[in-house]
Image (spheres, coloured by chain):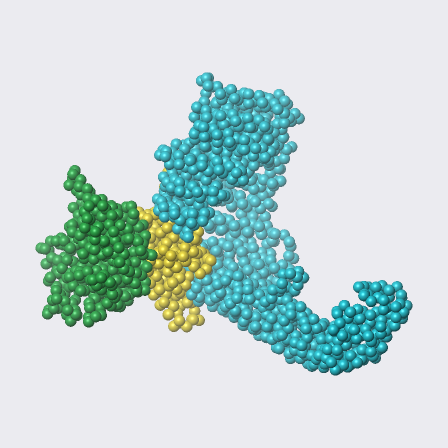
């Protein structure tokens, strides 16, 4: 599978069409063929998660894209990059947790799943690039806060102890997350 | 008794109410007499006399010629009361006078009497003791007796100066308002003369009113005041201050009174006040904005609506200075508020205001300044926002302003578009440095552009059709946009591509201007914004995208193509879209025929896509006619190439069924198709038919054609087909003359038998009773036909031939009125029951099948024989012969299933061999549907069930044969929910038992998994419909479901068991479920790793549902 | 060839995530804990199999201690094996006592044990992540996400009193561990560092900070002598640290004054020893002094002393002669569990025996062969 050829995700690399083409055949109905796990299946699992503070789904908000999911079937390894809409840690955290939890509930145990914030994320720096209407100091803060935040979020999502503490029984966060990933 | 006495009686409040009222009446009577005498109309007098004196206790005093009472006398006598020092007596006196004036509206007062009373009351106004009586009096004067100049003004002044509203009871306060109202109507000049003084008094009077009735009145009065008294201007602020404290109206009337004033009434009239003058603008708008910023949602929304109405009334000039704040507040709501209702309302408000501002050309500058505010802020956010949501909301605002009106959209677009395009180009430059979020931005920009386009179309083409000679605002940008989007079609991100697709189609259907706005859906060339060549390019690129690897894109491009097609005139499509499509399809066919198998899968796929597109294009009526020939050629090509995609062709017929087109072209199509089939099959020595899915689909097509043409046409066809099949007249079909030995019903060659279904299908669809259509077919012929069909059913070794003939007979029997069919049964039964080995198994089964179909025929047309036959079948279930018993068990599904009444099912792709596909196709055809003229009595099937169910149930309990269970579930599968519920007590244990059974049996035989499958189906139905009836069984149910979901042999079993679990979690209360939560969550883990994606999907859903239980 | 053999496995009765396990000092009992909020005590029933003189071990649940409202993260046996302390995400630490009568006839065939819940230590703001007894069994240390370390003292009546609350780590503290012989506490944190703490006139203060890991330090373990320390981290590396003593001081009679002269130096590092986060590491106290580490890549890695001879050649800038013994990564057991392995511990009494537990809701007993 072409994913193996580039394990670390190059975002928007146009993938081998032929391969993708078959992906459109979403399932087979005979008894014997084995449907392999693929990017789209993972994407299907997370696309409908809703943003905690909006009725919009992560797909609509463009927070998750199938281009940003990598799967290594043979190593049972999945990596998903998401792009928070706001450079705001707590939100990014919730979204990340939701994604992680949804996958944990939906995928076989053999898979190792990494959920990370996209390297260089949505909009934040754009204010810098876009013309000099916003005063640069402001921009610097944002960029800083964002990069800082990305670091924090990734480390926290990586820390399974914290994750499971956050989602431990009757924790408030758990109910938020459940809300987000409700089908 | 004397009048003075009577007066005393009235005035004296010690006396009982009745006496006093009588006294009053006496006086009034007196007055009447006066007038009646003058008129000399005794009759009248008597009547009034009676009605007034009704309940009179002392008629006796009223001797017939009792004193006439002249007004002046009366007043004189009343005099000392009117002067009396005692407040009470004085007020009573005044009241008496007032009563007289009120109760005798027709009392004719002469000049000086009027002025006297006027003076009197005006003077009396100073007398607080009897102010309310006075007010009433004045009201009487004004209302009934036309108080004259200058008294009105004088009276009003004194009233205002002397009487304080708080000192008056509600009714009297209202009277004052009524007085003012009347004066406005009659003596406007006098009041206007008062100017400011009036305003002052008026204000003081309406201030602080609480009573809803009075409020209503004064609210309604206010606009008049504003209209008539120019001086109000200087009081606008205080006037509004008074009004504003009522806003928003919080008042709920008591339910008791149906015609009581409602909150709505008050609100609406208060709204009128708000809107009554532009001068309020400077006060009301800020006030409303404040309310909008308040945090009660309802208030917000109400205020916004008020704002809209007001600004409409105030007009642009008045609004101009306030617009900035308006925008500020609204934008704040839209961008920051969470409640979607509020956001929507704010957008609406912006939309409305923009619209209002655009109505007058004169206001354009104001509109412009308003829109520029919006434009600047939005574009700023869009370019710089941290938050994609922010950008999105801004976009939606712009959409509002654009769709508001043509003018506005021109202004907005001419500002926004250049910025966006420039910004976009900038992005493209930066995109290398930072692919991730730049392309995100890119996407949102394109999305935005698309929204703008849509909005513009909305305003320009939908709302304001009658804007003559207006140019489309988008016009000047069309080329730049066109180039941009076209370029983006090759962008790497799927999202971008599908967006630009949409943009293009929107651009495409944008029209240039509204010259001679014709009503037609299709536009002439010069009307559309894009030149023809551009349009063609677009169509071309869409068509090529029809085959994109991403199916979301494919559907998108198809949709766009459709939108265009609806707007474009047919010529262009015919001349362009259709040919290209056909070309694509055919080329692929060619490739496919001689193409290597590896590529074929893709080409198949491609062609499928094109065909789908083609199909849906055909659904556009005007197009269909012109396309029909193409369809034919396609059809034939495909048959030649044995090409599977006929499905979609078939669906063309499905969709175009009610089109007259079919009626006119059927002959050509049908026999064209048939002869092609003949040629293929007869010329073709191998049994290659089984290797192509062609036959079933052709059959479906034939079926749908024949089913959808009228009787007379049918008769022709049937005549012809009989000629071909029964008289072996093959050369009626072109190009088959060379075929020798054509005798389908005699010959046993595979090829000829394979063609039999065509005959039987056509015959079965006859909308009339064949056995009784002597004009068409002679009785002997009928006999012959039936006989040969019967022969085929029994003898044929080709299942489809046998089955289709059985169906055909069934159809004939069902429609035939005569009872000439019993012998059929008599012929069948012996064959089945014959246990000597001289009839082979195949024949038995065929016979059984025929039996089933005949039963069905009766079952549907309500013939009582169906019951007996049902019994026969149920006995056969217990037959020692496995095949017979299985088949009999299955038969109950065929008997009751509804396919007959429903549309055709596509042959299910699950079935493995081509043969079984053909069979399933044929069995799934609606043979006995109303459309095929079958005689249907629905209730009878109900009866059949209620009779059969207990029999089978009993049989099962006796024999414990799993076949009976299959039979039962097949039965249940097809009954209504109500029936099911009534039988629940019986059904449920059975279902559970069958689940248990399979658990014990490690090996799931074919039959077992059938049994299990149908039980699960039933179970699912139960869980959906009557979950609570399940809950007692959860303990045993859940474990077995878990086992099935992880170990079941067929994916359908695993899938549906999971589905049941999911529904359980949704339909039962938590306290019932929680004991099983963990075991389910852990139990179905293996299913998450199932090799079939379908199962995994179901497992995921299920597991997530159970997780969030609480 | 296989160096590690699975000799027994516990499946039933475990939480779906087993976070931690601990041998009692006698090596006869295992305590485990996890996300089912309870503590399970397991007792070994040995069945000698004559075919090969392997011991077929079987483990039965001897008790289930249930008091916490959330996941129990870590547990610790007191040195005498009579007390258990359990740290939980519900921000409390519970203390349990093995009731004596059961303790006496432990060897009779009655497999169930009785524990009494004697007290609950509260005070931490957030989840308690780790708990540890000192070698005397009188001091107890707990640490939490609230970045603080609490030192508790137990008196004869087994009443607990908080001696000090120390801050110093910038983040979540993952685990605390006492020096095997001295009143020195080690702690590892989400801030990527390890700190050493010592009582300086009543207050426990950080005397050393060991910097070297590039991400969260998950677990640490002292060697038998207590002059070396091993740590594992989210950065996928295992680091060996060595104690460099100042001249005049002698750790055996440790005094607060001399504390400053302690220096811990990084003596050896195994870069990317696992392919994912390493959650647990343990240094055996038997004569072999083996080290074992495990983590999120489901594998177990064994480290053993290199042969004396070749430790002169690669004797790089390590300025301490006492602790030069180099270790080598001698064996990796892949797919030891079906999911993350959260903890691995040597049996204190039987050399070469260890137990591991993980997210596949099993405990597995391993033997080195």
Q: In which quarter of the image is residue C212?
A: bottom left
Query: Which residue is found at the position 45% from the left and 47% from the top?
Result: B1068
Query: Which residue is found at the position 45% from the left and 30% from the top?
Result: B957
Q: Is residue B314 above or below residue B1028?
A: below
Q: Where is residue C149 in the image (x, y as percent from the top left)?
A: 26, 65
> Would residue C323 be found to the left or right of residue B311 on screen?
left
Display colour for chain C: green
Q: In which quarter of the image is residue B768?
A: top right
Display colour for chain A: yellow
> Would residue B1025 be found to the left or right of residue C125 on screen?
right
> Would residue A104 be found to the left or right of residue B643 on screen?
left
Q: In which quarter of the image is residue B1034?
A: top left
Query: Which residue is found at the position 62% from the left and 74% from the top?
Result: B208
Q: Position of residue B408 (x, y in %)?
A: 57, 65
Q: Name the residue furthest left.
A: C309
For the N terminus of chain C, give its image quadrant: top left
The answer to whether residue B795 is visible is: no
Q: Where is residue C271 in the image (x, y as percent from the top left)?
A: 22, 57
Front one among B256 and B723: B256
Query: Which residue is found at the position 26% from the left and 55% from the top?
Result: C116
Front one among B968 and B740: B968
> Would residue B268 be found to the left or right of residue B533 on screen?
right
Display colour for chain B: cyan
Front one among A152 and C133: C133
Total label count? 0
Q: Position of residue A127 (x, y in %)?
A: 41, 67
Q: Is residue B997 above or below residue B280?
A: above
């Amino acid at each position: 599978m072409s994913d193996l050829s580039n394990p670390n995700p190059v975002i928007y690399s146009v993938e081998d069409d032929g391969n993708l083409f078959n992906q459109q055949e979403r399932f087979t109905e005979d008894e014997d063929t084995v449907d392999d796990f693929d990017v789209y299946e993972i994407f299907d699992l997370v696309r409908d998660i809703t943003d905690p503070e909006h009725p919009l789904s992560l797909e609509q908000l463009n927070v998750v894209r199938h281009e940003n999911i990598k799967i290594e079937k043979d190593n049972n390894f999945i990596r998903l990059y998401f792009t928070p809409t706001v450079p705001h840690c707590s939100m990014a955290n919730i979204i990340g947790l939701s994604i992680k939890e949804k996958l944990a509930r939906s995928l076989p145990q053999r898979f190792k799943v990494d959920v990370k914030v996209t390297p260089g994320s949505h909009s934040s720096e754009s204010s810098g690039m876009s013309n000099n209407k916003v005063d640069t100091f402001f921009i610097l803060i944002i960029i800083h806060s964002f990069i800082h935040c990305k670091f924090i979020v990734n480390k926290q999502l990586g820390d399974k102890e914290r994750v499971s503490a956050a989602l431990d029984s009757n924790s408030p966060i758990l109910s938020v997350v459940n809300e987000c990933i409700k089908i | 008794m004397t009048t003075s006495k009577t007066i005393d009686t009235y005035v004296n409040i010690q006396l009982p109410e009745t006496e006093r009222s009588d006294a009053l009446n006496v006086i009034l009577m007196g007055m009447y007499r006066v007038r009646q005498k003058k008129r000399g109309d005794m009759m009248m007098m008597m009547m009034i006399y009676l009605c007034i004196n009704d309940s009179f206790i002392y008629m006796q005093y009223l001797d017939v010629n009792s004193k006439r009472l002249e007004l002046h006398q009366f007043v004189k006598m009343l005099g000392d009361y009117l002067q009396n020092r005692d407040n009470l007596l004085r007020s009573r006196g005044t009241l008496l006078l007032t009563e007289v004036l009120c109760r005798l509206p027709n009392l004719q007062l002469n000049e000086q009497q009027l002025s006297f009373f006027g003076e009197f009351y005006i003077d009396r106004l100073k007398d607080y003791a009897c102010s309310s009586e006075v007010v009433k009096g004045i009201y009487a004067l004004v209302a009934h007796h036309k108080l004259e100049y200058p008294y009105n003004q004088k009276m009003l002044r004194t009233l205002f100066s002397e009487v304080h509203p708080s000192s008056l009871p509600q009714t009297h306060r209202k009277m004052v308002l009524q007085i003012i109202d009347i004066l406005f109507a009659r003596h406007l000049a006098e009041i206007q003369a008062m100017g400011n003084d009036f305003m002052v008094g008026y204000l003081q009077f309406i201030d602080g009113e609480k009573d809803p009735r009075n409020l209503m009145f004064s609210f309604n009065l206010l606009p008049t005041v504003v209209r008539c008294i120019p001086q109000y201007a200087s009081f606008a602020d205080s006037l509004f201050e008074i009004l504003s404290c009522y806003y928003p109206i919080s008042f709920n009337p008591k339910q008791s009174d149906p015609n009581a004033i409602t909150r709505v009434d008050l609100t609406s009239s208060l709204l009128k006040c708000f809107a009554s003058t532009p001068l309020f603008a400077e006060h009301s708008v800020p006030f409303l904005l404040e309310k909008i910023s308040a945090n009660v949602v309802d208030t917000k929304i109400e205020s916004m609506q008020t704002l809209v109405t007001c600004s409409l009334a105030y007009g642009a000039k008045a609004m101009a200075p306030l617009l900035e704040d308006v925008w500020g507040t609204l934008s704040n709501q839209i961008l920051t508020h969470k409640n979607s209702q509020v956001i929507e309302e704010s957008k609406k408000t912006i939309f409305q205001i923009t619209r209002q501002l655009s109505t007058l050309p004169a206001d354009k500058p104001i509109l412009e300044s308003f829109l520029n505010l919006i434009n600047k802020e939005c574009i700023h956010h869009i370019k710089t926002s941290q938050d994609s949501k922010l950008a999105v909301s801004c976009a939606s605002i712009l959409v509002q302003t654009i769709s508001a009106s043509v003018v506005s959209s021109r202004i907005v677009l001419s500002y926004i578009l250049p910025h966006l395009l420039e910004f976009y180009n900038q992005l493209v430059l930066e995109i290398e440095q930072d692919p991730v979020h730049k392309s995100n931005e890119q996407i949102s920009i394109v999305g935005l552009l698309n929204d703008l386009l849509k909005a513009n179309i909305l305003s320009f083409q939908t709302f304001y059709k009658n804007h003559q000679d207006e140019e489309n605002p988008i016009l000047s940008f069309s080329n730049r946009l066109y180039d941009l989007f076209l370029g983006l079609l090759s962008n790497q991100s799927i999202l971008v591509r599908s967006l630009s697709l949409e943009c293009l189609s929107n651009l495409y259907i944008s029209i240039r201007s509204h010259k001679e706005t014709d009503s037609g859906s299709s536009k002439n060339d010069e009307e559309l914004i894009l030149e023809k060549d551009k349009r063609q390019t677009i169509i071309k690129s869409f068509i090529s995208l029809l085959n994109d690897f991403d199916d979301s894109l494919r559907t998108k491009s198809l949709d766009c193509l459709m939108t265009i097609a609806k707007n474009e005139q047919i010529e262009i499509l015919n001349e362009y879209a259709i040919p290209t499509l056909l070309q694509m399809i055919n080329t692929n066919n060619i490739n496919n025929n001689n193409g290597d198998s590896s590529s074929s899968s893709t080409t198949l796929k491609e062609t499928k896509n094109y065909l789908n597109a083609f199909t849906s294009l055909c659904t556009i009526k005007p197009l269909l006619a012109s396309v029909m020939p193409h369809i034919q050629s396609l059809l034939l090509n495909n048959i030649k190439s044995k090409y599977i995609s006929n499905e979609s062709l078939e669906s063309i017929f499905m969709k175009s069924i009610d089109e007259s087109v079919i009626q006119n072209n059927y002959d050509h199509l049908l026999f064209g198709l048939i002869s092609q089939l003949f040629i293929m099959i007869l010329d073709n020595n191998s049994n290659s038919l089984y290797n192509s899915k062609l036959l079933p689909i052709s059959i479906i097509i034939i079926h749908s054609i024949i089913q959808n043409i009228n009787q007379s046409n049918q008769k022709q066809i049937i005549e012809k087909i009989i000629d071909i099949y029964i008289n072996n007249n093959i050369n009626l079909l072109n190009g088959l003359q060379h075929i020798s030995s054509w005798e389908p019903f005699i010959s046993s060659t595979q090829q000829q038998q394979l063609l039999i279904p065509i005959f039987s299908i056509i015959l079965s669809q006859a909308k009339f009773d064949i056995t009784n259509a002597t004009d068409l077919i002679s009785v002997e012929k009928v006999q012959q036909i039936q006989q040969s069909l019967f022969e085929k059913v029994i003898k044929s070794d080709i299942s489809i031939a046998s089955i289709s003939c059985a169906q055909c007979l069934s159809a004939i029997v069902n429609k035939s009125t005569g009872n000439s069919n019993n012998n059929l049964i008599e012929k069948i039964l012996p064959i089945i029951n014959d246990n000597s080995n001289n009839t082979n198994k195949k024949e038995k089964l065929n016979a059984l099948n025929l039996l089933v179909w005949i039963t069905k025929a009766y079952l549907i047309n309500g013939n009582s024989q169906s019951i007996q036959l049902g019994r026969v079948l149920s006995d056969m279930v217990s037959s020692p012969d496995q095949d017979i018993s299985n088949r009999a068990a299955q038969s109950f599904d065929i008997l009751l299933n509804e396919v007959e009444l429903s549309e055709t099912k596509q042959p299910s792709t699950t079935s493995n061999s081509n043969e079984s596909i053909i069979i399933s196709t044929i069995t799934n055809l609606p043979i006995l549907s109303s459309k095929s003229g079958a005689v249907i009595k629905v209730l009878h099937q109900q009866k059949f069930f209620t009779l059969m169910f207990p029999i089978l149930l009993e049989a099962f309990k006796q024999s414990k044969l799993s076949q009976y269970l299959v039979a039962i579930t097949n039965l249940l599968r097809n009954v209504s929910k109500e029936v099911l519920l009534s039988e629940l007590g019986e059904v449920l244990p059975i279902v559970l038992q069958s689940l248990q059974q399979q658990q014990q049996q490690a090996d799931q035989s074919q039959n077992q998994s059938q049994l299990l499958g149908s039980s699960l189906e039933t179970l699912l139905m139960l869980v959906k419909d009557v979950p609570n009836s399940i809950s007692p069984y959860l303990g045993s149910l859940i474990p077995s479901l878990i086992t099935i979901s992880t170990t079941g042999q067929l994916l359908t079993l695993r899938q549906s068991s999971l589905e049941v679990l999911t529904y359980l979690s949704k339909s039962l209360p938590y306290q019932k479920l929680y004991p099983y939560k963990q075991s389910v969550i852990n139990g179905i883990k293996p299913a998450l790793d199932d090799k079939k994606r379908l199962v995994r999907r179901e497992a995921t859903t299920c597991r997530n549902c159970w997780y969030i239980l609480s | 060839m296989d160096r590690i053999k699975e000799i027994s496995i516990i499946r039933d009765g475990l939480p779906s995530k087993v976070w931690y396990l601990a041998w009692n000092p006698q090596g006869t009992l295992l305590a485990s804990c996890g996300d089912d909020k309870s503590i399970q005590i397991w007792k070994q029933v040995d069945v000698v199999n004559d075919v090969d003189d392997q011991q077929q071990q079987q483990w039965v649940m001897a008790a289930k201690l249930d008091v916490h409202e959330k996941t129990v993260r870590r547990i610790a046996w007191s040195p005498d094996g009579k007390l258990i302390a359990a740290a939980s995400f519900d921000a409390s630490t519970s203390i349990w006592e093995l009731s004596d009568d059961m303790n006496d006839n432990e060897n009779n065939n009655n497999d169930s044990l009785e524990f009494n819940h004697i007290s609950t230590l509260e005070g931490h703001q957030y989840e308690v992540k780790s708990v540890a007894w000192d070698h005397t069994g009188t001091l107890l240390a707990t640490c939490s996400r609230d970045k603080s370390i609490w030192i508790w003292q137990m008196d004869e009546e087994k009443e607990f009193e908080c001696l000090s609350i120390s801050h110093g780590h910038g983040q979540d503290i993952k685990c605390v561990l006492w020096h095997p012989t001295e009143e020195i506490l080690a702690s590892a944190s989400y801030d990527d560092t390890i700190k050493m703490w010592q009582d300086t006139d009543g207050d426990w203060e950080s005397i050393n900070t060991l910097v070297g890991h590039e991400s969260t330090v998950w677990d640490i373990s002292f060697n038998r002598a207590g002059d070396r320390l091993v740590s594992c981290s989210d950065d996928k590396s295992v680091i060996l640290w060595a104690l460099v003593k100042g001249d005049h001081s002698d750790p055996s009679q440790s005094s607060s004054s001399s504390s400053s002269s302690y220096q811990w130096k990084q003596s050896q590092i195994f870069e990317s020893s696992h392919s994912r986060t390493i959650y647990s590491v343990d240094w055996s106290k038997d004569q072999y002094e083996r080290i074992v580490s495990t983590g999120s890549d489901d594998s177990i890695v064994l480290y053993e002393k290199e042969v004396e001879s070749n430790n002169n050649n690669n004797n790089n800038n390590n300025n301490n002669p006492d602790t030069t013994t180099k270790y080598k990564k001698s064996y990796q057991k892949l797919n030891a569990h079906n999911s993350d392995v959260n903890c691995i511990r040597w049996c204190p009494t039987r050399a070469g025996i260890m137990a591991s537990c993980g997210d596949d809701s099993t405990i597995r007993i391993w033997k080195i062969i």
